[in-house]
Structures are given as structure tokens and as C-alpha cells.
Image (cartoon, rainbow, N blue to C red):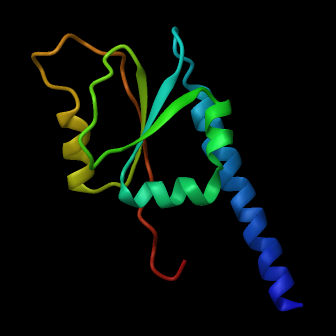
Amino acid sequence: EIESEMSSTNNGIRSVVQDRMLSLLREVQPAFGWKVLVVDKSSVRFVSKACRMSEITEEGVSVVENLELERQPMPSTEAIYFISPTLESIKRVIADFPEEVAPAPAPEAVVKPKKKKGL
């Protein structure tokens, strides 16, 4: 019985997180075509637990990119950064926008709060 209640609570939490994640993706409406979701190593686990790839695609995301890996520039595609609040991740986002490059569409940034101990 306790396991059933815990499973029910976890599904409820997952549903709330999933709804919020998809809502954030829905808020970004690019003028032309698709958008890119960029995640760091911590956030990718969070996103994959909350949403299926098909749900993310339904919200107009064409590809999910790993912030830590070398990526092809996509200056005409809007990006949503869903990252952890670490210095490494912030530096990588800044590196995506070198000053000498023509302005790209403004990225949307969602910083996942650090998990508090005991939660």
C-alpha cells in the first residue's frame, strides 16, 4: 500500500514537472520553423525523466543538443537553454555567442535550481 502511494505521488510530481517543461517549450514561438533545446549533463537527465522525445518534438523542438559537446552553429534557429546553475554551463552558453558573429535570435534560458539536500 505504501509503495502504491509513493508511486502515485511520483507520477503526480512527474506530471507537474512534465506540464511545466512542455509549457516552457511552448512559450518560445520562433518566427520561422523549429527551435533547438540545449541541455547540460545534469539537465538532460531531468528532461528525459519528465518528457518523451515525441512530446518535445510536438512542441516544435527539432533537436536536443548537449551543451558539453561540440555543436554546429545554427544562427538562424532559436535556442532554448535548459541548464544547471554551474559556472561551467554558464561559460559554455556565453561561448555560444561570440561577439564578432552577427546577432542571432535571443536565446531563451531556463536555469534548473540546484537540488536541496533532503529533497
Q: Nearer the viewer, residue 81 or 51?
A: 51
**Residue farthest to the left, as pictured:** 100
Residue drawn at (21%, 54%) of the image = 87
Quadrant of image for the N terminus: bottom right
Judge left or right: residue 53 versus residue 116. right
Relative to 5, residue 63 above or below: above
What residue do we see at 45% from left, 53% from top? 112
Task: Name the image quarter holding residue 115.
Answer: bottom left
Q: Horizontal and vertical percent for residue 52?
A: 65, 49
> Looking at this view, is 112 or 73 the one in front?
73
Q: Position of residue 61 (x, y in %)?
A: 55, 30
Residue 104 position within the rendered picture, expressed as x and y whole percent measured from the top left: 30, 15
Observer-nearest of 77 and 54: 54
Horizontal side of residue 103 vs 109, given as left or right: left
Q: Eyeballing the image, is 32 above or below 68?
A: above
- In the rendered view, tell whether residue 63 sits above or below residue 7: above
